[in-house]
Structure formats: C-alpha cells, structure tokens
Image (cartoon, rainbow, N blue to C red):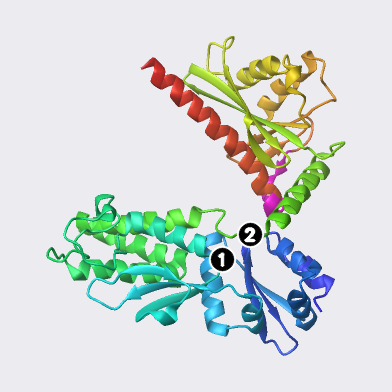
Amino acid sequence: MISKNILEKIPHKIGVYMFKNKQGEILYIGKAVDLKERIKQHLKSTNPKIQELIKSAEDVEIILLDSEAEALLKEAELIKKFDPLFNQLLRDDSQYFFVGFTKEIYPKVFVTHQPQKYNAEFIGPFTEGSALKKILHIIRKEIPFCTCFKPHISTCLNANLGLCYGWCCKEKEKGDPNLYNQNIKKIKQILKGNLKEIKKKLLKELKKLVEKDEIEKAVKIQKQIIAINKILSQTNLIKTLSTEEERLNKIKILKDLKILLNLEKIPHLIEAYDISHCSGDYKVGVRVLIKDGEYDKSGLRKFRIKTVLKPDDPRMIYEVLKRRFKHLEWGLPDLILVDGGKIQLKFALKALEETGLTGKIKIISFAKPKNLLYYHLNKQPISLENLPYNLKSFIKLIDKIAHRAVIKYHRKLREKKL
C-alpha cells in the first residue's frame, strides 16, 4: 500500500506518475495536471481494478513536467517502453490511439486505434485521442502534411487552407519529396521526443541560418519553433475525470477558495470585472458571472465608462462597481474578482463601502504580471504559484474570461466608431 509519507511528498504539479510494486516493477503509468489530486483519487477509488492496483503498489515515482503536452507525450513513451499490466487492465474495452505514417513517397498522416489494420509506421500508444488530434492540428498549421488517402485531380481543401502542399495527393502534379519528408521527420520527432530539447536545437539552427542569410530555410525552422511553442502552451489536453468527478472537483475548488480567502460560505456566485480602453478612449468595462464554477453567459453585463476622462483603470473599476451595486435586482455575489493590483482593490472596496455593502461581499484583485492575489489592503498578497494547480488555474480562468469579454466589447465599439 502507498504510505501517507509518500503522498505528502507529491506536489500539486503537472507530470507523469508510475505505481511500482515491492520489486520495483512498474504496475501502472498515468499523467495528471495535478499529481497529488490524481493519486488521491486513485487511493479513494471504488473501482475494483484500481483498488487491486493500490493494494499491489508500494511506491509512486513521479516525473515533473511544465506542460500538459509534455505529460501526454512522456506517458505514451513510457507505456510503450514498459507496457504495464494495469494499463492494459484499466483500458477495459477502450483502445489506445496511434499516429500512423503510410509507407510511400509522400506519407499520409492519420490517427487510429487499430494499427494492426494498416501497413504503416506508428507512434504511440496515446491515451487521449482528442488531445492527440489537437496537437496534430497545431503542427499542421506550421508544418504541412497530407491526410488524403485517395488521389484526386483538383486541389483539396486542406491545400487551399495551407495545411498541405497540394501536390502530395494529386495524380499529376508532384513536388519535392525531400521537402515533404523533412516535415514528416520533424513531426515524428515532436511526437516522440523532448519538446524543449527539440526547440533548443532548432533555435541554434535558426541562429546559424540567419547568420548565413539563408532566409528561406530560416523561415521553415521558425515555423517549427512556433508549432512547438503553441503545443507547449496548450491547456485542457488532459481529460481524466468523469462528469461526476469534474462536478466534485469544482465543488472542491470552491471549498478551497472559501478556505483560502476565509469566506463565510462557499462562493457559489462569483463576479469578475475588467476594464479596456485605448489611451483613455473607448473606455469600457464588463462583468462576467461564474455560477457554481461554470461561466454563466446570461450574467454578462457591459458598461460604457462615463465619468473617467483620462486613462485611470482603478477609477474606472470604481465607477463600474458603483453602477453595478445599484442593481440589487441582479442579486449579490459571494465574491468579486477585479483585474489589477492593490490600487484596483482599494477603489473597488471604496465603491463597496459607499454603497453600504461592506461585509456582505468579499472583493479580491488579481495582478497578472506577477500572479499575485490581493485580498486585503494591509496584508501581503498571495502568490498563485504556491497554490494547488486546480485552484490556481481556476482563478486564472475567471480573470481570462473577463478579459476576453471586455476586449471583445472594446473591439466592437471601436469598429462601430471607425
């Protein structure tokens, strides 16, 4: 059995984990955006197969990674290498996903969970089909490849979209097979390898090409670097929770937020505010509503700033909140998050006080550049880097939803004026 001492040492970070028996044999390999929470779920599971896994396990080895994509690729690499018993048992009727490359002059790229049916080279196994397709979609925008199995005369849609060269699947027009196969080789490297190490080598190659003034080659390398950067920045690739688990996870996040901020009750209703303007012109603000951890689109409210003439985000926040607090028919939230730092929090609290609602609503502010959460004017802010991954991601997500909404409103307003 896994001891509490082992669990305590596991961090709230992204990575891959491996359950091992007394002899050090790997029983199961998995990935998670929050290693501690995922392993806790295994320990509490009522699934007979997982319970048997936990009884057989004596240790957990973890590999910390910086992105979900790296965790996905590392998991596939290790499952292929060790083929653990419980990975087979826990798949039930579902099957792994593989990326296939046909054996021809212009290899076609495809995803399947039945590699035995094809005469092709495969990379895998991958546990997340949707995540795998998302990564390939990102790669394809910068490193074109073909997916057409049947030859055709006219240019296909993918070629028109720049996702394929257009000549690799035509009956008559043919292009440079060396160029195409260089792309295929790079795709295989990305799916197999250490993304950061690949990026490091590409950056060195790019520097040499620029120094030699080989611009055309440098542009191709730059596109490969862009693809890797996009893959590394992707979130929501790992989906390991059931609908019920996701619901319980959101409840836990809200409970953790209640404890973190010393709230009287779980924040079922959260409002987030953000401001946007162009050097003081086209000044707008928005409110977005988060209900039981989910974004409620019906709660979106838009504000045209009326009283602040110069660029002054704190006073714009003050105006928006003063106007919002006049609408008691909207109901009162349990928590308000404003975009900004300590000054924004000060003006938000001023609006709350002048409306006579002090003590009834908790207000916090989120300063993005340093990832600091201000919850009290006379206390040090909380660093999001010290919070569990799920809670940190939730706070960032709320702020991002508000930011996207206000930018969209601001852009629409400017377009109307032009």
In this picture, is 241 found above or below 16?
above
The answer to whether residue 2 is above or below residue 25 is: above
Residue sitting farthest toward the bottom: 23
Label placed on residue 33: 2
Task: Give the residue type that dot 2 points to.
Answer: Val
Q: Is residue 344 found left or right of 261 in the rendered image?
A: left
Q: Residue 364, percent across and down?
A: 72, 32
Disc number for residue 5: none
Foreground: 316 or 138?
138
- Give the mark nearer the N terminus: 2 vs 1: 2
Kind of residue sitting beneath label 1: Ala
- Which stretch is magenta? 381-390
| Tag 2 and tag 1, C-beta contact below 8 Å | yes
Residue 307, how many percent across, how many down? Answer: 59, 9
Q: Quadrant of the N terminus?
A: bottom right
Q: Work out whether residue 393 can be spotted.
A: yes
